[in-house]
Image: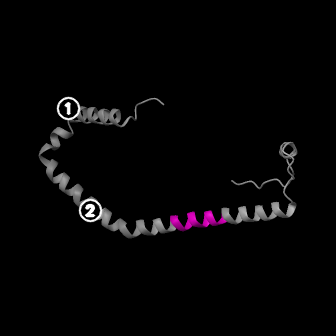
Amino acid sequence: MVTRMSDEIDDRLAALFAEVHETLPSAEFMQAFLVRMERARRLRSMRRIALALLLGAFAIWIMPAVLTTTATVMRAAAEQSRPYAALLISPVGWGASMLIAFLVLLRTGALRRK
C-alpha cells in the first residue's frame, strides 16, 4: 500500500538547508516535482503491467509445446525404468533416493545456516 507524502515542511530539513545557507525550493517547484514523480511512478507501473501481460501471453503460447515435450520425456523415462520398478519402490530404493536428495541439498548449500 502506498501512502501519500506530506506537504508539510520538515523542520530538520529546513535546519539543514539553513546550515548551508541555501533556500528551500519554491512551492511551484515542489508541486511540479511531485507531479513528475507521480507520473514516473505511474509509467513504471504501466511498464510492469505490460511486461507481465506480455510474459503471460508468451507462456500461454509456448505451454502446449512444453507440456507435450514433458509428457514425451516422462513417457520415455517410464519405459526405461520399468525393469527397475520393484527396486525403486522398495525400502532400499527409498533409502537410496533419500541419500541422493541429501547429497543434492548439501551440494547446493540448502542446508547451510545463514
Look at the magenta stretch and give its main secondary structure.
Answer: helix
Q: Residue at x 87, y 53 (%)?
A: 23
- Name the side, left or right, on which 66 lies relative to 18: left
Mark sitting on residue 55: none
Residue 30, image x, y percentages: 81, 60
Total tally of numbered discs in the picture:
2
- Name the side, left or right, on which 66 lies relative to 46: left
As displayed, is residue 84 above or below residue 36? above
Label 1 or label 2, whichever lies nearer to me, is 2
| Of residues 100 and 31, the one drawn nearer to the viewer in this rendering | 31
* Kind of residue at badge 2: Thr
- Name the side, left or right, on which 27 lies relative to 73: right
The stretch in magenta equals 42-52
Separation of marks 1 and 2 at Cα, in angstroms: 31 Å
Q: What colour scheme was applied to this rendering of the protein?
A: one colour
Crowd tier of the residue under label 2, counting other residues whose Cα lies within 10 Å: few below 14, some 14–19, many 20 or above: few
As displayed, is residue 42 above or below residue 90? below
Residue 111, image x, y percentages: 40, 31
Mark sitting on residue 69: 2
Q: Secondary structure at mark 2?
A: helix
| Of residues 20 and 106, the one drawn nearer to the viewer in this rendering | 20
For label 1, the residue is 92
Q: Is residue 69 highlighted in magenta?
A: no
| Of residues 76 and 113, the one drawn nearer to the viewer in this rendering | 113
Q: Residue at x 36, y 37 (%)?
A: 108
Residue 44, image x, y percentages: 61, 63
Q: Secondary structure at mark 1?
A: helix
Q: Residue at x 31, y 32 (%)?
A: 102
| Of residues 86 and 100, the one drawn nearer to the viewer in this rendering | 100
